Amino acid sequence: MFLGGALVLLCAPPGCGEGESAEQPSHLGEWEIPPGTTLSQERYALLAALMDAIIPGDAASPGATIARAAFYLDSLLGAFRSDPPRIFAGGPNSGRHGGADQFSHFQPLTRVEELRWRTFLEGSNGIPEREWNGPVVGLLRRYEEGLDALNTLSKEVLGQAYWQAAVEDRTHLLGDVDEGFLQMVYEHAVEGTYGDPVYGGNVEQAGWRAIDYEGDRQPIGFSAHEMAHPEEG
């Protein structure tokens, strides 16, 4: 699920380029915590550990950790900490294959778009214009509650916080995690690992390398022969 094609970027993780923060990341166990995260440091570590169990990988075949999928999701949760909110990237070219980098110029939201996205991310919070269709629990709260429940489960079953557990134990515990929450995290882990790098994940195109995908080709595109014979690479 691509959430209407909208992904986000706040501050950049190491190697992300122009927007990179001068602050240094901190660590919780083996998990690197970028500066200024939307989630608390422990919840961010929980998220990173969970996404690592969902899409594991290594240097040869990068997964969610190397691609910084957790950073992508944390940036989505804090989208309105930037102006304009980093939700809809520009276009049509990324600059990776010629032309100007227009992806990095994020678009202002209309009034209705801002209402929709604030409600989705932050929840309705009793605000009448956000509750025209009833109360809404925001994505941030859903993640906070889900990650806290995961950590409680891990302490009961494994005797330690989820972010402290070995990958084998973290993977085994997935069978006991709330199915709806796990599906939501899976979808965001996929977006953060394999989505366009401008949105904060897939750092240095690590996810694309893992699946042998070259990414966007505009403005050079593909020749008629390449389109007719994709098996030739």
Image (cartoon, rainbow, N blue to C red):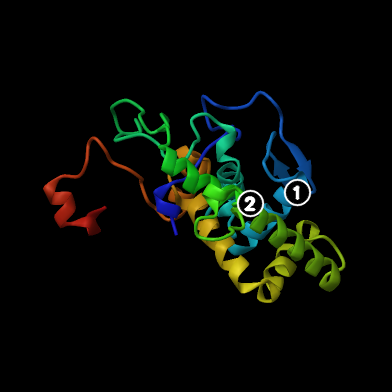
Secondary structure state at the residue bearing disc 2 = loop
Query: Three-letter amino acid code at disc 2?
Result: Gly
Q: Quadrant of residue 15?
A: top right
Residues under labels 2 and 1: Cα distance?
39 Å
| Pointer 2 or 1: first along the chain | 1
Q: Residue furthest right?
A: 159
* Residue 73 image position (x, y, % from top left): 58, 48
Residue located 28% across and 27% down the image = 99
* Residue 33 image position (x, y, % from top left): 71, 41
Instruction: Give me the disc on residue 119.
Output: none
Secondary structure state at the residue bearing disc 1 = loop
Disc 2 crowd, CA 10 A, few/some/many (<14, 14-19, 20+): few
* Residue 200 image position (x, y, % from top left): 53, 40
Q: Which residue in the structure is indicated by mark 2?
A: 126
Residue located 47% across and 48% down the image = 116
Quadrant of the frame with the N terminus: bottom left
Classify residue 109 as left or right of residue 135. left
Q: Residue furthest front?
A: 128
Closer to the camera, 125 or 12? Answer: 125
Disc 1 crowd, CA 10 A, few/some/many (<14, 14-19, 20+): few
In the image, residue 8 above or below residue 212: above
Residue located 87% across and 67% down the image = 159
Q: Residue furthest bottom?
A: 175
Q: Quadrant of residue 94?
A: top left
Residue located 42% across and 39% down the image = 88
Q: Which residue in the structure is indicated by mark 1?
A: 30
In the image, residue 88 above or below residue 154: above
Query: Three-letter amino acid code at disc 1?
Result: Glu
- Circles 2 and 1, Cβ within 8 Å, touching? The answer is no
